[in-house]
Image: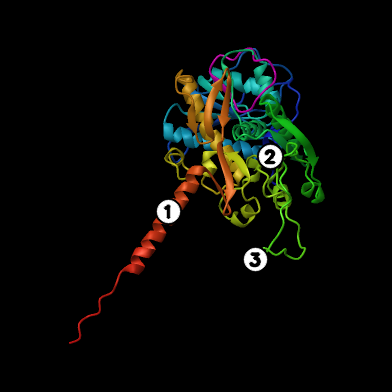
């Protein structure tokens, strides 16, 4: 079955549409203990009932953190993503060793989330994480009975009924906005946007353009790439200020003689120009070779599929700047290494969700101990997390593609230092003179 990218996940799979009317009655709990000793209780919701029950019966009541996820969704992809989030959440719980976690599984979040939430409170939940889908979050946001610190794992545009409901997720639009900020801080002011006309591409382009305008930038053009390289080689950019355009570069030999006509050199790009690729990894690989090498190129984490077994593909994205999370870019960082990786290797989009589960638990733990504001910003495995009203905002690491790798400035410096040390050691070894033994 086709695997979706991270952007498709959060802007499609987690936007599943469903009505929020009938809600099931009492869930059934099944408990288990992980290898790390963390108590995980899965509460499964039965088929929807026609009316919301006025009272619920406590099922094995005890203080705990409730995790509401669509683990029984009919969408295999969504159920799998929910499972990965659960794994990350449980991994962080094992490290923190706080309250036990009880998982409340749903098949249709908009229809079941309120009853599952009420059941969790009845069972003694002191904090709640979830739901995961945007429709599920919208349903919960409209519920006036939020009585404990609750962290929704997505965003909602609906009015919040309480100051106990917080929001945290990985919307790709936020990365597009961060890229606009990074480019503006680099002194760029004229942007050409390349889209592929998909839903996620349009959202990324819109988010970038909105933030770019707020920062005083200008959108020179928006180009739709449908496979024709001509639209890229003739990409519109802002012109040079009148009277400052340099003479066309000419190809000459070392003696100064003109070389025979060949491939024309790309025209010099006026300062301040850039291009934003609102595309995925595969489309960006097709676009990058046709872009003027003097044009700064920016994109989101949709381009980064990790550094493992991806070096050849990453070479095609050379010098593209993007943002992503420390979990993928700095796996050897001490703040990242403290949390265990998944038992089985995950695809990059799944690994990001696993990391989101880790940081979700850490944020819930802070909400539970009333340390949300005093303990922020948080250097999370998904990025630097701050709180804006009730929305947790994540700032990814700035990175770029070079030598077939996705690197931050720190990781590049570490690589260069390691190479220099290895070269020095080799030179010292080769300079050691071997004194011949005296003849007998």
* Tags 1 and 3 touching, CB below 8 Å: no
Provide the residue designation for mark 1: 418
Q: Is residue 388 left or right of residue 63?
A: right
Task: Verify whether residue 149 appears in magenta.
Answer: yes
Closest to the camera, between mark 2 and mark 1, is 2
Q: For residue 23, which quarter of the picture?
A: top right
Q: Is residue 84 visible?
A: no
CA gap, disc 1 and disc 3: 40 Å
Query: What residue is shown at x 47% (from left), y 47% (from top)?
Result: 413
First in sequence: mark 2 vs mark 3: 3
* Tags 2 and 1 touching, CB below 8 Å: no
Q: Quadrant of the C terminus?
A: bottom left
- Please, what secondary structure does the residue beneath circle 3 have? loop
Task: Verify whether residue 133 appears in magenta.
Answer: no
Q: Is residue 406 above or below residue 358?
A: below
- Bounds of the magenta segment: 144-160
CA gap, disc 2 and disc 3: 35 Å
CA gap, disc 2 and disc 1: 32 Å
- Residue 368: x, y in percent? 47, 20
* Tags 2 and 3 touching, CB below 8 Å: no
First in sequence: mark 2 vs mark 1: 2
- Taking depth in this image into account, of 211 and 371 the one nearest to the observer is 211
Provide the residue designation for mark 3: 255
- Taking depth in this image into account, of 178 and 375 the one nearest to the observer is 178
Provide the residue designation for mark 2: 274
First in sequence: mark 1 vs mark 3: 3
Query: What residue is shown at x 29% (from left), y 72% (from top)?
Result: 433
């Amino acid at each position: 079955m086709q695997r979706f990218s991270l952007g498709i996940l959060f802007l499609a799979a987690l936007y599943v549409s469903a009505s929020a009317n009938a809600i099931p009655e009492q869930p059934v709990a099944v408990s288990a203990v992980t290898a790390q000793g963390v108590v995980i209780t899965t509460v499964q919701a039965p088929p929807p009932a026609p009316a919301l029950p006025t009272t619920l019966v406590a099922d094995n009541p005890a203080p705990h953190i409730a995790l509401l996820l669509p683990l029984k969704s009919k969408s295999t992809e969504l159920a799998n993503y929910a499972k990965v989030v659960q794994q990350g959440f449980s991994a962080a719980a094992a490290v923190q060793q706080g309250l036990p976690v009880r998982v409340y599984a749903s098949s249709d979040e908009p229809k079941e989330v309120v009853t599952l939430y009420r059941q969790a409170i009845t069972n003694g939940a002191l904090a709640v994480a979830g739901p995961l889908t945007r429709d599920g979050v919208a349903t919960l946001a409209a519920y006036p009975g939020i009585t404990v610190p609750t962290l929704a794992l997505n965003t909602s545009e609906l009015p919040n009924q309480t100051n106990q409901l917080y929001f945290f997720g990985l919307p790709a639009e936020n990365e597009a906005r961060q890229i606009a900020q990074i480019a503006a801080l680099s002194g760029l002011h004229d942007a050409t946007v390349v889209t592929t006309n998909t839903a996620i591409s349009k959202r990324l382009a819109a988010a970038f353009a909105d933030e770019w305008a707020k920062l005083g930038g200008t959108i020179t053009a928006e180009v739709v790439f449908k496979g024709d390289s001509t639209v890229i080689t003739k990409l519109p950019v802002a012109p040079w200020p009148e009277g400052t355009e340099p003479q066309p570069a000419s190809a000459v030999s070392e003696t100064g003689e003109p070389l025979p006509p060949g491939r024309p050199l790309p025209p010099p790009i006026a300062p301040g120009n850039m291009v934003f690729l609102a595309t995925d990894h595969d489309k960006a690989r097709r676009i990058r070779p046709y872009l003027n090498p003097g044009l700064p190129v920016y994109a989101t984490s949709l381009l980064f599929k990790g550094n493992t077994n991806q070096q050849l593909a990453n070479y095609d994205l050379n010098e593209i700047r993007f943002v992503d999370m420390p979990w993928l870019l700095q796996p050897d960082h001490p703040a990242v290494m403290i949390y265990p990786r998944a038992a089985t290797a995950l695809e990059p989009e799944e690994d990001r969700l696993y990391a989101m589960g880790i940081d979700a638990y850490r944020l819930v733990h802070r909400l539970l101990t009333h340390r949300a504001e005093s303990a922020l910003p948080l250097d999370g495995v998904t990025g630097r997390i701050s709180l804006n009203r009730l929305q947790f905002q994540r700032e990814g690491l700035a990175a770029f593609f070079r030598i077939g790798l996705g690197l931050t400035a720190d990781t590049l410096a570490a690589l260069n230092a390691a190479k220099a040390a290895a070269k020095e050691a080799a030179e010292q070894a080769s300079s050691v003179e071997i004194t011949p033994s005296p003849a007998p």
